[in-house]
Amino acid sequence: MLKHRGFPGRLASTDYQFTLRRANPKGATEITRRERRSDRRPPDKRADEAFFKALWEHFGEEPFERGNLDAGRLSWLFGREVIPATDPFDPAHYESMLVIDVRIARQTYPHIVGE
């Protein structure tokens, strides 16, 4: 499992995890698309935004390996701002490649991605 050095481990002053310390011996947790409803709590929305900002600052438009990024946090962005970079894509593998969909990211987080 690739460890993304310099990537924040969690949202400051919270328990919202962004990275894993070690690989799960039973295998990687599958990334699935989670629906973001309008009634989500503000702290959850802040965690999504902070995680996306860290992804954008760390990887930009380049494809990146899932590595030690938290599957639960990725799942909130998967299928929208973060999409598979390869076909076929294995959602339950640490070496899976992802990429930011800049077009969607500009709509969702224009203050982060910009024009």
Image (cartoon, rainbow, N blue to C red):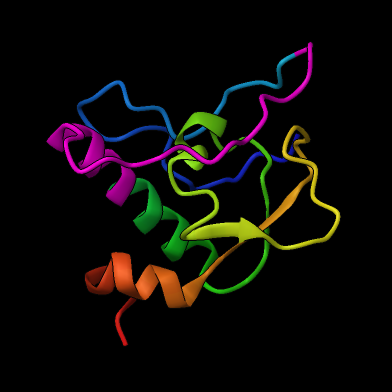
Residue 74, magenta (yes or no) = no
Quadrant in which residue 8 is drawn: top left
Position of residue 81 measured from the top left corner of the image (x, y, whole percent): 46, 60
Question: Which residue is more in the foreground, 4 or 67?
Answer: 67
Quadrant in which the N terminus appears: top right
Highlighted magenta segment, given as a residue range: 25-49
Question: Which residue is more in the foreground, 62 or 35?
Answer: 35
In the displayed structure, would residue 56 be above or below residue 17? Answer: below
State whether the magenta stretch is mostly helix, strand or loop. Answer: loop
Position of residue 110 measured from the top left corner of the image (x, y, whole percent): 26, 73
Task: Tell me how many marks there are.
Answer: 0
Quadrant in which the C terminus appears: bottom left
In the displayed structure, would residue 95 be above or below residue 111? Answer: above
Quadrant in which residue 25 is drawn: top right
Residue name at image x 68 percent, y 40 percent: 67
Residue name at image x 83 percent, y 60 percent: 87
Residue name at image x 60 percent, y 45 percent: 4
- Tell me if 90 is positioned left or right of 64 in this view: right
- Tell me if 77 is positioned left or right of 92 in this view: left
Position of residue 22 measured from the top left corner of the image (x, y, whole percent): 66, 21
| Outermost top residue | 26
| Outermost right residue | 88
Position of residue 74 measured from the top left corner of the image (x, y, whole percent): 51, 41
Quadrant in which residue 40 is drawn: top left
Residue name at image x 56 percent, y 26 percent: 20
In the displayed structure, would residue 30 be above or below residue 24? Answer: below
In the displayed structure, would residue 58 be above or below residue 114? Answer: above
| Outermost bottom residue | 115
Residue 38, magenta (yes or no) = yes
